[in-house]
Image (spheres, rainbow, N blue to C red):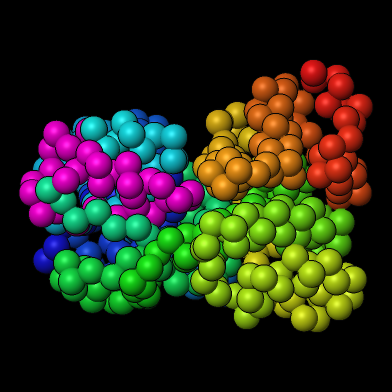
Amino acid sequence: MAKIFIYGAGSIGCYVGGRLLASGGDVTFIARERTSNQLRKYGLVLSQFGERRWSVAPERIDVSTDCKAAAAADLVLVTVKSAATSTVAKELASVLRSGTVVVSFQNGIGNADVLRAALPDMTVLEGMVPFNVVERGPGAYHQGSGGELEIRHAPELQPFSGEFAKAGLPLTQHADMLTVQWAKLLLNLNNAINALSNRPLKEELAQRAYRRCLGMAQAEALGLLKRAGIRPSRLTPIPPAWMPRFLGLPDAWFAQLGRAMLTIDPLARSSMSDDLAAGRATEVDFINGEVVKLARRVGHRAPVNERLCELVHEAERSDVRPSWTGEALLAELNAAASGVCTMGQRLHA
């Protein structure tokens, strides 16, 4: 049986690793001390939208705070925040055996490249987790939306595919993951809007003003991707190029036509919203910030996504959690797009 290590036991790592473990896989978690203690005390209770449940008793969980434990790995799933990728790459380089398969199941675009540069003797693959996972309590993780794991095609995956399928997490393989990653990032541009709204995802997406904010961020990104010659994959029933206009539909129409987007746990929030609530640094620079970087590469600007980055960073520094209304946030982004200096920008100048 393959030895699978989860490097970064946050919500995604605990959920994916827990599902593999619940189906009989040989899984070890590399976690911080707080999470390690929780897993040893509470085990794992996993649930999925639609009321499916799995549980793993504490005595069945193998967890370590020492990266050296990964020396025994056949497969490593990296699920840390993007800002920690360089550190993790160096740690893994010092312990992994040649030929180990490493998968980046992280937000953003360039994490696999960072890992690949530090791990030249390993098979490093881009992966993508499309669904939202919410931590409901110590050791309790809930999948609040649907989707299947996406990963770069490689022959080296063959020994592991059956274990993921057995766990109900089949791997959808692609020859070109860059277009898949950008398609996911287009959807993840909502993370910042959700975090700034301080509302559950379902409630936020049900309001046209917030959706128009997302549509602006996506339209900006799509224009830059076209200039760069990148055509994002289609991950939803609506093609990416149609999404900004679709998001602007009146609420009643969107409720009917966008039912799939609203099929999500009523309490689920974006990981960025959870990070703000917990006082942690967010991944906004690896999501909206990727659009800003792309703009620079093609000789343009991305004022809407720039402003979203600024607002999230302001929220990170604030002692009071912001709760933007959709109308106020839309006005802020419209002002940024038109180059108008708003009162908020003057105050922070």
Residue at (41%, 47%) from the top-left corner? 110
Please report the bounds of the magenta region as a residue range: 91-120
Residue at (75%, 65%) from the top-left corner? 244
Tell me where residue 335 appears, x and y as whole percent. Answer: 87, 40
> Which quadrant, please, contains the C terminus?
top right
Total numbered labels placed on residues in the image: 0
Which quadrant of the view contains residue 221? Answer: bottom right
The one nearer the camera, 305 or 80, is 305
Q: Residue placed farthest to the left in the image? A: 98
Q: Is residue 44 above or below residue 252?
A: above
Which quadrant of the view contains residue 85? Answer: top left
Tell me where residue 28 appears, x and y as whole percent. Answer: 23, 50
The one nearer the camera, 177 or 270, is 177
Q: Is residue 128 above or below residue 332?
A: below
Which quadrant of the view contains residue 15? Answer: bottom left
In this picture, residue 70 sits left or right of residue 331:
left
The reply to whether residue 188 is in sight is yes
Residue 191 located within the stretch drawn in magenta: no
In this picture, residue 91 sits left or right of residue 145:
left
Q: Residue placed farthest to the front in the image? A: 299
Tell me where residue 126 appears, x and y as whole percent. Answer: 35, 58
Tell me where residue 323 appears, x and y as whole percent. Answer: 81, 39
Residue at (79%, 69%) from the top-left corner? 245
The one nearer the camera, 178 or 197, is 178
The reply to whether residue 144 is in sight is no
Residue 118 located within the stretch drawn in magenta: yes
Q: Is residue 313 above or below residue 170?
A: above
In this picture, residue 96 sits left or right of residue 171:
left
Residue at (47%, 44%) from the top-left corner? 138
> Which quadrant, please, contains the N terminus?
bottom left
